[in-house]
Image: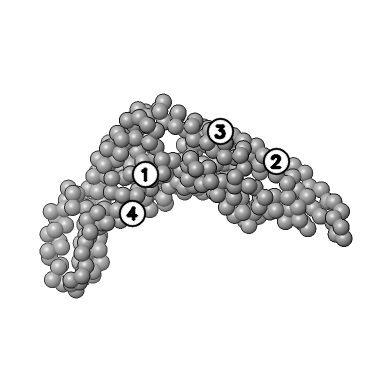
Amino acid sequence: MKKIVLIITIIVTNFCFAQHNDLTIGLILPEPNQKITESQITKLESKLSNVINRSGVVSYGYNNDFVIHPVINVDDVSIVQGGLEKITVAVIDLTLSIKQISSNKSFNIVSKKIKGSGKTEELAVTNAFSLIKVDDKDLLAFITKGKENIFKYYNENCKNILSKAKGLSAKHDFEQALSLAQSIPETGNSCYLEAQKNALTYYQGYQSKLCKENIVKAKAEIAIKNYENALSYLNIIDTNSSCYAEVEKLIGQISGKVEKDENKVIDLEKRRIDAIKEIAKAYYFNAAHSVEYD
């Protein structure tokens, strides 16, 4: 069964592309099926995301393609007499693996037996997931060790990653180049700083590409006299873009035809942050990965 997973790899907290959290880990979860329901998957997601955040060494999210991949096997289901009514008991073997989706490489693995009970097997499985402790020492140690292994991977492969990002930029694949540079955490060496510096260059290239696309859109709106829409396209173009002179010319042409708002002050940094968010949004949709869940 295939699960479409959106790998969000560009998370920007300010104009300089600084990452507040040095590493995030996401989740790959199965689709609902005959063995596991949507509500059970939601319960498992809630528990595992809380475990990730509780670890204190990583946070739940997607600024790279590292994820926790759970494998769920219901080992045993039995019915026991519980007072006046029978109770169903489910024993589940839960195996968690920290993986990098692009390489399918595993960075740590842990298995836990969890047990739940209820009036039905479905309720027993749901109960088992609800009993996962967010401060489970084994799970927290699993995440901590996984982060150590991921950092080791980046320290050993930094040059290759930077080289790949540079190659993507040369092919004008600025979104992926940016996302790859952004995926590099701050591990204590010069790799992170170099990646952030390179990301600024890739962003400038993307801005030139974005500029040309938005000028075309703006001209199309001007042609049908939708001046407000035209101005909205022009206003998101960065002033450092290579074609900004044309942007200023177009703004001058339509400025008298758009209702003025004297209280509206365009904050350059906010404009850039908003533009970067658009890059991320585009990447969320365009860089979706089809992952075969097994």
Q: Count residues near mark 2 (Cα–Cα under 10 Å), then give few for <14, some for 14-19, many for 20+.
A: few
Q: Count residues near mark 3 (Cα–Cα under 10 Å), then give few for <14, some for 14-19, many for 20+.
A: some
Label 4 to label 3: alpha-carbon separation: 34 Å
Residue type at mark 3 is Asn
**Disc 4 vs disc 3: which is toward the camera?**
3
Q: Is residue 70 above or below residue 81?
A: above
Q: Residue at x 51, y 47 (%)?
A: 53
Label 1 to label 2: alpha-carbon separation: 36 Å
**Disc 2 vs disc 4: which is toward the camera?**
2
For the image shown, how many numbered marks are present on the structure? 4
Element on which disc 2 rests: strand
Pick whichever, 221 or 148, lies toward us: 148
Q: Earlier in the sequence, mark 1 or mark 3?
A: 1
Give percent across and percent down for residue 127.
70, 53
Q: In this figure, which residue is indicated by the disc labeled 4?
A: 278
Circles 4 and 1: CB atoms closer than 8 Å: no
Q: In this figure, which residue is indicated by the disc labeled 2?
A: 113
* Residue 63 in view of the camera: yes
Pick whichever, 177 or 126, lies toward us: 126
Q: Is residue 75 left or right of residue 186?
A: right
Q: Earlier in the sequence, mark 4 or mark 3?
A: 3
Q: Residue at x 72, y 56 (%)?
A: 123
Residue type at mark 4 is Glu
Circles 2 and 3: CB atoms closer than 8 Å: no
* Residue 30 in view of the camera: no
Residue found at the far top of this picture: 156
Label 1 to label 3: alpha-carbon separation: 24 Å
Residue 95 shows which numbered tag? none
Label 2 to label 4: alpha-carbon separation: 43 Å
Q: In this figure, which residue is indicated by the disc labeled 1?
A: 19
Residue type at mark 1 is Gln
